[in-house]
Image (cartoon, coloured by chain):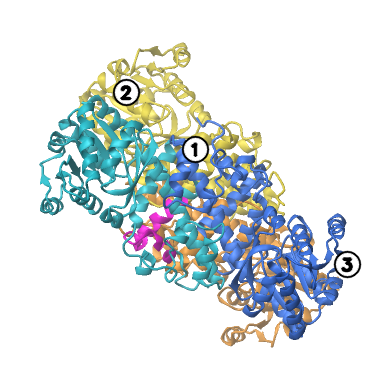
Chain colours: A orange, B yellow, C cyan, D blue
Amino acid sequence: MAGLRTQVFKQVICVHHVYNGAKRFASRIGFIGLGNMGGSMAKNLIVKGHRLSVFDTNPQAVANLVEEGATALRNPADIAKNVECVITMLPNTSHVLETYQGENGIFQGIQAGTLLIDSSTIDPSVPKQLSSLAKNQGAVFLDAPVSGGVNAAKAGSLTFMVGGQADEFEPAKEILSCMGARAVYCGPSGSGQAAKLCNNMLLAISMIGTAEAMNLGIRLGLQPKLLAEIFNSSTGRCWSSEMYNPVPGTMENVPSANNYEGGFGTNLMVKDLGLAQDAATRTQTPVMLGSLAHQTYRIMSAHGFGNKDFSSVYKYIQEIEKSR
Amino acid sequence: MAGLRTQVFKQVICVHHVYNGAKRFASRIGFIGLGNMGGSMAKNLIVKGHRLSVFDTNPQAVANLVEEGATALRNPADIAKNVECVITMLPNTSHVLETYQGENGIFQGIQAGTLLIDSSTIDPSVPKQLSSLAKNQGAVFLDAPVSGGVNAAKAGSLTFMVGGQADEFEPAKEILSCMGARAVYCGPSGSGQAAKLCNNMLLAISMIGTAEAMNLGIRLGLQPKLLAEIFNSSTGRCWSSEMYNPVPGTMENVPSANNYEGGFGTNLMVKDLGLAQDAATRTQTPVMLGSLAHQTYRIMSAHGFGNKDFSSVYKYIQEIEKSR
Amino acid sequence: MAGLRTQVFKQVICVHHVYNGAKRFASRIGFIGLGNMGGSMAKNLIVKGHRLSVFDTNPQAVANLVEEGATALRNPADIAKNVECVITMLPNTSHVLETYQGENGIFQGIQAGTLLIDSSTIDPSVPKQLSSLAKNQGAVFLDAPVSGGVNAAKAGSLTFMVGGQADEFEPAKEILSCMGARAVYCGPSGSGQAAKLCNNMLLAISMIGTAEAMNLGIRLGLQPKLLAEIFNSSTGRCWSSEMYNPVPGTMENVPSANNYEGGFGTNLMVKDLGLAQDAATRTQTPVMLGSLAHQTYRIMSAHGFGNKDFSSVYKYIQEIEKSR
Amino acid sequence: MAGLRTQVFKQVICVHHVYNGAKRFASRIGFIGLGNMGGSMAKNLIVKGHRLSVFDTNPQAVANLVEEGATALRNPADIAKNVECVITMLPNTSHVLETYQGENGIFQGIQAGTLLIDSSTIDPSVPKQLSSLAKNQGAVFLDAPVSGGVNAAKAGSLTFMVGGQADEFEPAKEILSCMGARAVYCGPSGSGQAAKLCNNMLLAISMIGTAEAMNLGIRLGLQPKLLAEIFNSSTGRCWSSEMYNPVPGTMENVPSANNYEGGFGTNLMVKDLGLAQDAATRTQTPVMLGSLAHQTYRIMSAHGFGNKDFSSVYKYIQEIEKSR
């Protein structure tokens, strides 16, 4: 069985190595969850020469991939029966559990030696459990959530944060490299999810902090662009101030330059912060600013910013009415 | 009068230009406030060839500078009578107001054409007022608070954030360059203070955010160094995670590697955040995370972290006792 | 001088005692600041038999009181020259300072023996200063901010929180009793303001807490009225849950039953919380929830709730849009 | 089956009615979870004439009850086989799930017609699930968490917040009345837990608010007792200020009068706030102050206040060291 998988990965490696030339070998990969993210990731796998079997509850999403050359199968179990590697990209924890453990789920069709990669963002305690169930069936489970949004998915420039057995990371990297620019090994099962949640919690905090500091400076009479430069050459520097400034007019090609369209939606940030909050509650870890950031994005969501980029927190805190 | 000042600055410029050669001209500069920061800044001015008159209420601090070649005078008014430029580096707003407006204060001795530079960190509404009083006496007032702590003051590598009339910035820059590596023009009177407060508020938020995210990740089983690398190559990146990581063992030569000794004390951060809070209250600007960061550092101060570096917030939030 | 004032208060006492019968004696009182609150308070003094001299920068406000029998004077100094007691009811600290210390201010017309009562809500550090200036002129200054809004002002049912010399409290109480149902002596100068700010900070926190807890319960399927009853018979009980519930349908005759019209405006709460925040900053007192409450009301103000009753925080936090 | 249960409750009612006279009938009740709370509750049931079968993993706790007349059984299943009513009082959600659904759990021994009462404080989404499983076996499940701590458990003066089918409330009330002074029907399954969590979240917020407002007032020079009185006769009034004031010296017979010993431990509050936070995350309900209260108690727990009464938040926020 290990032999089978090794063989498969040798093929993958070959595909990868000869990518600029003719495709000779191609691995059979199953892809479940063909939404905005998953759809683009699946296409990139086809482009890189893999044979894909796909499943989604949305027929149109499936049709789009079939047009690109994928084979549609009836359910996750059927997918699992026909491939050496299954990738899942689903909206949340319960979808992932259902897809793996439900009726006609992956675990009902899985073969020994299969590599299971879940790129959904879910509760970091779940991968350990799925990993152990996979092991019972001779398979391997890795959590590999992504950073970088829809555009990075299209461009194949995602970053994968990977959790699981260290010796499974290299083979998986070959496949991940077809969909992303980078894969970081984070530690045992669940570590990929943990790293993603921590990163996004820090991002959420820094973004609100940047919005507050920019807003305060502007209210005190400073020019926004100059203020951003001061931060960026000083101790206030952060990704949000430097690469993704939330104040319109300070940068081009970021959501704040485009009425906060595109980018990473507030509702998605609420979801990730909810998972971080759950993890903090479970591990009794104090996250004062993390909690406040979570609640702030949640209230923004309630005030019409749910589908705007999360940097719209700047707009949200601007004074739009004079107080007495 | 403008002529006098221009002349003075020509001299300064000369000093500056010939710094690597012989000192020919040197401007007369008054320095008030010779604490940890001010003392080192004053020494650097002497080293760069300026003649210094100094004042401080602490006789030892004065004696130290006299040893370096400075002349001690009896009060701020006397300083002002004898120099072309006065630099103040004082603990807070009320010290600055007293030093300028009090009995035997600067305004009682000031000559037309004098350049007044206040490098203290104070309420950003005060410089406008002092600037206007200075103007009435034919003098010029600039606010020029610094970033970079005691070590940067010693090394002459401070950053100055300067507020005041734009055409006074270039001449002042010559003097500031003797004490720092960089001077940024921020806008009209008070803008230097405003920029500093906004930067430090963002710094305070990012630092707590970094501490929370690192702590959560560690509690979830991630290796601290790896987690910091993930942040720094991703959207969680900020100065606190990259240059000044609060978790012992992740970096060398930062306060977290040295039991949080040295660096920028929690009490100083409390002071700056208090000024930011006041500015936010006055301008009715919402600063949710800024307020919470302020209160968090204040409570830390109450629990023995007041004289530790502000990155000790990591230690503060670590679980030191098992909850039931 | 003390004799004069004592005599005046004896008259007041008489007026008070014979209120249901004929008015025989009446003290001369000056009233400055005839807005929604001050106008009603002044009227009540007239009704109770006092002779009023009034001043306001708004001519219509003055005209209204003249119609009720008051005499209009040109400025605070003129008021002070003609009365035994001056009451001020002004929007904020700077108005109070100007009215007392400005050109033609109270201190320019004041007579020895005058009783000065400031019912404005202002920075609690200011009364001490005004009290000391008053003392220099042989007068007495009390801070006496009110609780209870416009309706209580009309009905004469305000509560006064009084700071100043203890032995001046009883005489002042006689006058205050014409405008309110209750006066509480809080301690030396500034204590009235301090008590008010602390009370309102606690009120602001409890109100948001009540709104959050009611909202969470309702989202979990509980009936609002039942939930309020559970709180009120248990440890969650507070004035906001019991007397002023923010959830529409739980109570009658409160702002939540009337689209949050009337009551105590969010902008006024922002002002009081700003003063509490300033006091906390000055005294280095940690107020975590107090700060967050302040910022929350400030953001509400920015989102159109500024002139709604402060209990509209319930409406503000309700989910009005489905998150993904 | 319904008949059997009705009959049982008639007996209970009899017991209750004739309590002051001779005991004639007594119901058979199972009690699982004999800790500080459960042990006292079980004793009260025995005192009121019920025959108890008990189970706990701690042999000493079981021995104590056997001494009072209870019968020890080997596991929850055995308990369920032998009684008409099972009461559980366990530390957390996972203990409850294990006790009901685990090997030799209640559901393996349960008879039709049994009344199941869970008085643990757990995730409010769990009772619905247990209720439905109970129904499948012809039994009835009620959630009935308590308010009032160890002393109320001893004194039999607890308050029960009950969720489940309305028509089961009255019979259950008879049994609950043996252990408590009051039972409130809150709505369908899970409502008891929901009500408790919302109440405790509001309590946590009010307590911290009271501590902050008292502390600020004291720092501004007010007398603690006087300040408490002002709150309690005004809009700041809440259970924490009135019945359980956190400032030593303001009240007798409360934890603050006894070095914060006894009462409701910070760690227990952390647990309840964690459940509230989870419920808020699941229902996407904004709880800004609720989250901050949760994190504050969690940090207190990390700083040695975990086993102190939750009103020790006052001590926690007091300035114990002078800031610079």
Q: Mark 2–mark 3 contact, CB under 8 Å?
A: no
Disc 3 target residue:
D73
Disc 1 target residue:
B269
Res D92 seen here: yes
The disc labelled 2 sits on which kind of residue?
Answer: Cys
SS category of the residue bearing label 1: helix
**Magenta stretch in the rendered image:** C292-316
Give the image location of residue D12, x and y in percent: 74, 73
Q: Mark 3–mark 1 contact, CB under 8 Å?
A: no
User: Is residue A90 positioned above or below B245 on the image?
Assistant: below
The disc labelled 3 sits on which kind of residue?
Answer: Leu
User: Is residue C80 positioned above or below A33 on the image?
Assistant: above
Q: CA distance from mark 3 to mark 1?
A: 61 Å
**Which residue is rendered at x = 69% and y = 43% of the image?**
B320
Q: Residues within 10 Å of mark 2 (few under 14, many from 20)?
A: many
SS category of the residue bearing label 3: loop
Chain assignment, label 1: B
Residue B205 falls within the magenta-colored stretch: no
Give the image location of residue D161, x and y in percent: 62, 67
**Which residue is rendered at x = 29% and y = 28% of the image?**
C132
